[in-house]
Image (cartoon, coloured by chain):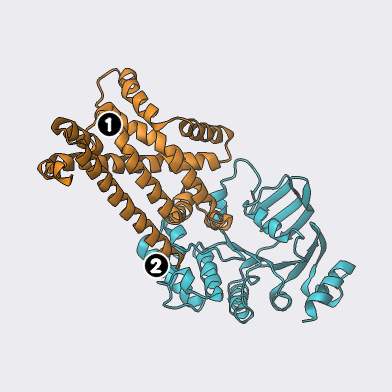
Chain colours: A orange, B cyan
Amino acid sequence: MLAAFDFGVIGRNLPYLWEGMQLSLLLTGLSAFGSIVLGTILALMRLSGIKLFQWIGAVWVNFFRSLPLLLVIFWFYFLVPVVVQQQVDAFQSALIGFVLFEAAYYCEIMRSGILSISRGQAWAGYALGLRYSQTMRYIVLPQAFRNMLPILLTQTIILFQDTSLVFVVGLADFMTSAVNVAQRDSRLIELYVFAAFVYLVMCYFGSLYVKHLQQKMHR
Amino acid sequence: MIDIQNVNKWFDDFHVLKNISMSVAKGEVIVVCGPSGSGKSTLIKCVNGLEPFQKGTITVNDVSVGAKDTNLPELRSHIGMVFQNFELFPHMTAMQNICLSQLKVLGRSQSEAQDRTNTLLDRVGLEGLGFKYSSELSGGQQQRVAIARALAMDPFAMLFDEPTSALDPEMINEVLEVMQELARDDGMTMMVVTHEMGFARRVADRVIFMDEGEIVEDANTDDFFGTPRSDRAQLFLSKILQH
């Protein structure tokens, strides 16, 4: 039975699949960076004393959390070229979509991170003459990041899995590359098993690392 | 130096400060005491604008704390504050804690700030401990770092909000001694919220007794401990001085 399978197809296409993986990792890294920055700004807006900012932050979060990611990716693929009036490559439009979408989730993580820092810490900063921005930058946010690091990483692992959705806009990430090989060589089962195995291993070890980090922090 | 006139503050419906008027002259040490919930911690946080108040005026060195156009960060940089829970920044060493505002607010150079920090650490009896994180220091040591951090800004007045309440008994004196030196040797203007009546008796020029958001008694130290005029202050003293 197993003789009917040809796993050699994976070895022969490894360079092509690796290229896809590099794109997946690049997209994950850039999206995570952009959406953590944007999410932190949104979290500060939600926690600010200014009604308008609170409203913008809340609308953003609720809006993107109510949409399927697939729709957002499609949307930006067709929308961004119209807005900027020129051809935009699929990678850029996917990146924008991911950053705006994931920022909603990172925002809520950072918001609880900031709320986990006692009010007295900010008071101590203000009492020394630091401004709001300095107090956030030097005192509150570094501690919030530290406390939330395991959850931020977990969200990034989810983001890594989600990048496989760029399949729909034909971007050659790892998943799309696997599908391409599978269809060209009619080796669907081999390639889908391999793709599942790769995602499983990477995400499993990612989660183990998060767990290790959590234990280290609680010590 | 610090002048508080008819200050009223509400937390929603709760009237936490009722018509508070008092002042602290330059070089004076004032102890504010009273039962918990009497509003004394809230009052001291109003002095540097950490807590807003709805009515009345507070001026520090002739600058109005509550006015809209006041540059609060600038004013606060001249008023040192020490908190009940120390509030050292746990992700920084003692040295970094004391240097931060010197670098970011006063614009001192790194070496200048470090020299000043070392001098201050010596002064509060923590020579050579600048590399420690707050989690590696005892409560008394943490509070002394916090005092050094406030002094690094060369403040013209110091506010102490129950500086020894979170300390184990054997560490209270090391903190009180630093405060006492500050009052005696530097002639620092100090407003101290505390239950340490021994400290009040030794160091304070005046004692203010608060209860239920009001100032019940404002007297010279000797008069306060000799013959408190109000029943409430007498009752408070009899309870607190028994042990």
Q: Residue drawn 45% across and 37% down?
A: A104
Q: Is residue B211 left or right of residue A56?
A: right
Q: What type is the residue that disc 2 sits on?
A: Gln
The residues bearing labels 2 and 1 have C-alpha atoms spaced at a distance of 56 Å
Are discs 2 and 1 both within one chain?
Answer: no
Is residue B230 at all visible to an observer of this figure?
no
Measured as percent of width and height from the top left, residue B159 is found at 63, 63
Dot 1 crowding, Cα within 10 Å, few <14, some 14–19, many 20+: some
Measured as percent of width and height from the top left, residue B28 is found at 68, 67
Mark 1 lies on residue: A167
Measured as percent of width and height from the top left, residue B17 is found at 77, 53
A80 lies above or below A53 = above
Q: What type is the residue that disc 1 sits on?
A: Phe
Q: Is residue A113 left or right of residue A19?
A: right
Q: Residue drawn 77% across and 73% down?
A: B221
Mark 2 lies on residue: B114
Quadrant for the N terminus of chain B in the image: bottom right
Q: Is residue A58 left or right of residue B10?
A: left
Rendered image quadrant of residue B225: bottom right
